[in-house]
Image: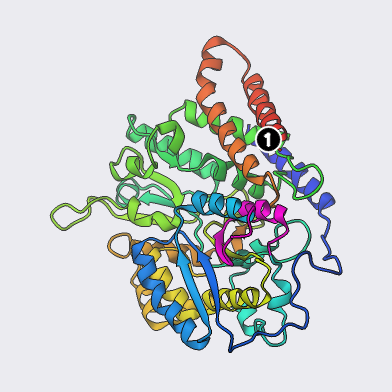
Amino acid sequence: MKKVLSLVLALAMVASMLMLVACPKPPIAPGWQIGETTFDTETPVTIKFYSTMGKNLIETIDPFLAQFMEMYPNITVEHTQPGGYDEVRDTIKTELQVNEQPNIAYCYPDHVAMYNRSGRVITLDQFIDHEIYGLTAEQKADFIEGFYNEGKQFGDGWMYTLPFSKSTEVLYYNKTFFDKNGLSVPTTWEEMEAVCRQIKALVPDSTPLGYDSEANWFITMCEQYGSNYTSASGDHYLFDNETNRSFVKMFSEWHYDGLVTTKELNGTNYTSGLFVEQKSFMSIGSSAGATHQRPAAVDGAYPFEVGIAPIPQVDAANNPKVISQGPSLCLLDGGDSQENIAAWLLMKFLTTNVQLQAAFADASGYVPVLKSVTEVPKFAEKLEKADGGNNIAYLSMKVCLEQADYYYTSPAFNGSSTARDQVGYLMQAAMSGYKSYVESGKSIDELIDKVFKDAINECENQL
């Protein structure tokens, strides 16, 4: 299996290089244009901002919104929380039909692709490069590149979003158990399999690894192998190929051998539950959920120390990849140029204010999107004291910042969320169905062929 995967990887990387075509910007950006319009600082203007922030984050950001409104006394910001990310998306989808949408909103790339069917998503290049309202060279350079580039993943070369706060996936491991048993933290998937088998031999009733998101796992492996997943233009759904079939088959074998489970297969909210109960000894999940990976203290002490490391790679030396997650911000045109410019000014403030980014990261556990946040004294001090106990959120952020050059984002288009859902279901179906195919004597390749074809058909039908 390993030899086959190595050969397939080599062929996939060659194919990727041959297919890589730059997407030049067309001469005119779509939608509303600022043109020669200037912002009237005297006339009152109200802008609506939708987010998913809970009470503690609202309390964190409110002083900064007040600061913004002091800078621009004629702007009033109405900050509303319709619910979670899906509720924000669905509310905006409905409001776009009657032109009552917010001016600025939390978003994920597939949300923006859906909103853009209305033609009301404002491209940001015209603001970013504007002589009066734009970003300075220093501000542009301060963004973590992988987070910033997410805004350009829409197939036409234009910038549609700016990053606000981000997360990724990291590997949590039971450092106490690893140290006691002389185990090495895996850096590659081959090493991961070996470590899982060592743990299974030591604790037969355990499931050594929990991976929260099957969809993230599939998409990340596509990136690490350099194999096709989706495209923003042309044929969208490209994930049915030999490289991807091979790693899905490999991970299904792992599940059959009791080495790994996922959030859905385990039937729990997150695999962190197994991890804190020491029913598993490694967990791959969101960097922003670090405190949920820490066991409850007993008599003032934690039952074990949590270690955090980057996720394993296929080729860490030449093609390290880890997913970029967390909300960005987009602007929506309501037909009022003054509101559009005011919304941009708020977007610029939220994404480039170093003190705001430091405070929000501290309160949320999300990774700041600016490199210079590490120079803020209080943030730097906490980062220095990061550990797997009381300061576990900062240990997670530290690992995220150390792999700043590894982040990737997938192409965004109307239907990209469907692809994400279907590759997650594909992974579930392959891993859960493996046992019955083995026991009935059926070919595993038939199972892999079926789950891939079913996923492609669902994607194309829903599109």
- In reply to whether residue 109 is colored magenta, the answer given is yes
Between 449 and 282, which is closer to the camera in this rendering?
A: 449
Residue 311 visible in the snapshot: no
Residue at 36% x, 43% y is 281
- In reply to whether residue 278 is colored magenta, the answer given is no
Q: Toward which corner of the image does residue 442 lie, by quadrant?
A: top right
Q: Quadrant of the C terminus?
A: top right
Q: Quadrant of the N terminus?
A: top right
For label 1, the residue is: 462
Q: Toward which corner of the image does residue 337 lie, by quadrant?
A: bottom right
**Label 1 Cα neighbours within 10 Å, binned few <14 / some 14-19 / many ≥20:** few
Image-based side of 6 in relation to 143, left or right? right
> Where residue 316 sits in the image (x, y, percent)?
60, 55
Image-based side of 230 in relation to 314, left or right? right
Between 193 and 432, which is closer to the camera in this rendering?
A: 432
Residue at 29% x, 55% y is 305
Q: Secondary structure at mark 1?
A: helix
Number of numbered tags placed on the structure image: 1
Query: What's the amino acid at mark 1?
Result: Gln
- The image's colour scheme reads rainbow
> Where residue 229 sits in the image (x, y, percent)?
69, 44
245 above or below 37?
above
425 above or below 353?
above
> Where residue 24 sits in the image (x, y, percent)?
84, 64
Q: Residue furthest right?
A: 27
78 above or below 188?
below
Bounds of the magenta segment: 97-121
